[in-house]
Amino acid sequence: MSDRSTIADAFADGPAFIPYLAAGDPSYEASLEYVEALDRGGADIIELGLPFSEPIAEGPTIQEAIVRALEGGMTPERFFEFVEDLEVEASLVCMTYYNLIYQYGTGEEGPRPFVERAAAVGIEGFVVPDLPAEEADPLRAACDEFGLDLIFIVAPTTRGERLERMMDRVSGYVYVQARLGTTGARDDVSDQTGATLERLAGYDVPKAVGFGIKTGDHAERIVAAGADGIIVGSALIDIVADGHASGAAVEETAAALETRARELVDGAARGAAADGNVPEPEQP
Amino acid sequence: MTDPTQTTKPGRTDRPDGSFGRFGGQYVPEALMPALEELEDAYGRYVLENEDGFMDEFRARLADFGGRPIPLQRADRLSERYDREVYLKREDLLHGGAHKLNNALGQVLLAKYMGKERIIAETGAGQHGTATAMAAAHLDMPCEIYMGRTDVNRQRPNVFRMRINGADVNPVDAGRGTLKEAISETMRDWSRTVEHTHYVIGSIVGPHPFPAMVRDFHAVISEEAREQCLDRLGDLPDAVVACAGGGSNTMGAFHHFIPDEDVSLLAVEAGGSSLEVDEAAGVAPNSATLSTGDEGVLHGARTTLLQDSHGQIMESHSVSAGLDYAGVGPELAHLVETGRVTPVNVGDRVALEGFHRLSTEEGIIPALETAHAFGYLHEVCAEDGAIDDDPLGETIVVNVSGRGDKDLETVIEKTAEMGLEAAPDMSVFDGGLR
């Protein structure tokens, strides 16, 4: 277990808010503004997506964001420049698929050149949705060498030995997948989440819950159920996509993102105040 | 020297962890890992150990429902034309008109033994989709097929067949709308429904145990062909030729010949319109993965891929929807790396000429995928053939992986477009068929 990055600190003062955006969606410049707006809105950690052409773990919302980002010219090298250009307080985690990590550099050194470059621009950790613990040792070794965290996704189906194997290799936080399926905003909160959090209760690593969180109320209930952080992607990308489709000004979309970020941060804080008790759903 | 009368053990190249040399593995979202473990367990018990008589039932159904064993036929006209002995393994005669039923029936039956309640599958040319829809109807399982929009449009007869067998067909609009996108979308469905659904993957691709398991279901092709050669010819052939996209008919046709080192194994890929790559557009106008690709990770496996310098997957191309894929099975990538299998390729035009030659001279209309193998045969064996290198020898088995009914619209259109010499005059049909 590594705790050399500052990622674990993000969980020290109450629940962490962890937004996700695809870097370069819909353009390099606009995307910089959007990420910085989320930082102003209270992000503790930001998961930045480096778009891959075959995102098998993503639902339609993030797939479309990835298409927009790729069409806008995003590449691994542009991504690193993007990170250098960002002015944010939050810790930065790179979320991408293994082929892009693997192909960076000469192709003979495995994931090391990518991790080295990521560390140099200030990335502090990775989430790689198509890299289960069984295949992760080369990336784990490179992360250890450069002091980065490797975050694993725990699914509702993850149990027993597989969970142990993952917990042996995880650092920073675990990404608790709230429900089966692909990413995407939902209108309800899954009861699979509580069961997964219970299985993880004995492990001394922050648990951040993602997949389907959309509103401050969701955030409140998830944190009250025992989460140490909330990960929100598709609900924010919906705002980016709407702004792009309607031709709204970048500042307008950025302001909407910042507002939603504050709503989610407030919801998470209410959940923490509930002290582990799941509040009753609000009456209309 | 291999003794050809000795029955060899199957040429398994996979290690217990499912890797083939440095290829293979399980690069999938965490949610799918328990399903892969469950499938590994079922594969080991039912397929490898014949628990509960699974393989006996599979073989019996392949015979009664599928029509196996499938003949090995001498191609008289081609043999005469090339002054060699050309034999055809007639997988086009398997129920459904392609080799695909071997695997589809095996996996749907396995899903039943595993207690799964629903079948999903991807399809490119529609051959795997139709085979899965048939097998699902035969075994009374609900079935949904994902198919790229481009492929839905160019393989309509197969869409109708799937619907008529009672399967739902979901068109996929992402990307260029071909096999790659269909696989990604089927994996997404599976990650939602994994607890009660089995994903019948259609080739020797994907995470372990799919590549090994799909190969084992198709290995009956080479098991029969090898015995038929020994019975008929008293000897093994000099070469086995099969087309290769993902590689399922290829590995099926090769598997039992792998230990026979004197038998050359030729995998014929789609050269498309060109082997040149347009990096800026992210397009490879071919699907010659084994010939031109390099190592990477796609759809659950480390294998050989068509990708740009950043690792983004290229859009592939072939006149044949079934070969139109930017990846290839990890076992085939491994066998090419070790030199046991030789990758070759021919383009759209040569494949179309092969299509017409087999149709007019032998009375067999092959699938456009299969036609690539006959295009290659001609380029090597004909006096005016373009390929000087001759790895084929005197006795050649070509795997006729499927029949071409599904391709007739494409063939008529492309034949007119290219003005092919080998083709019958199609001009009378201009404007009348579409």
Image: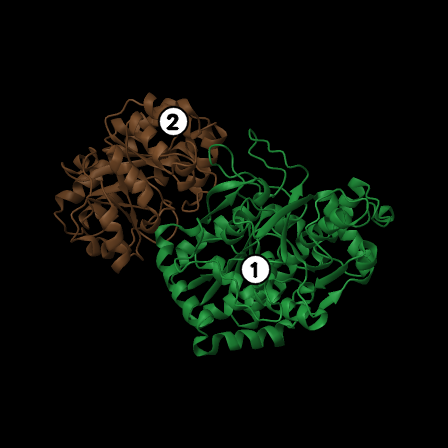
Q: A260 or B320, which is in the foreground?
A: B320
Q: Secondary structure at mark 1?
A: loop
Q: Nearer the viewer, residue B434 or B332?
A: B332
**Left or right: A52, with B423 as reference point:** left
| Label 2 residue SS | helix
Q: Which chain is green?
A: B
Residue B55 visible in the snapshot: yes
Q: Which mark is residue B258?
A: 1
Amino acid type of the residue tagged 1 in the rendering: Ile
Which residue is located at x 59 percent, y 42 percent? B291
Q: State the residue position of label 2.
A: A31
Residue B169 at x, y percent in the picture = 56, 56
Left or right of B77: which side holds A43?
Answer: left
Tell me the kind of residue under disc 2: Ser
Pointer 1 and pointer 2 on the same chain: no
Residue located at (59% from left, 59% from top) = B254
Which residue shows up at 73% across the image and 53% down it?
B374
Rendered view: B416 above or below B266: above
**Which of the chains is brown?**
A
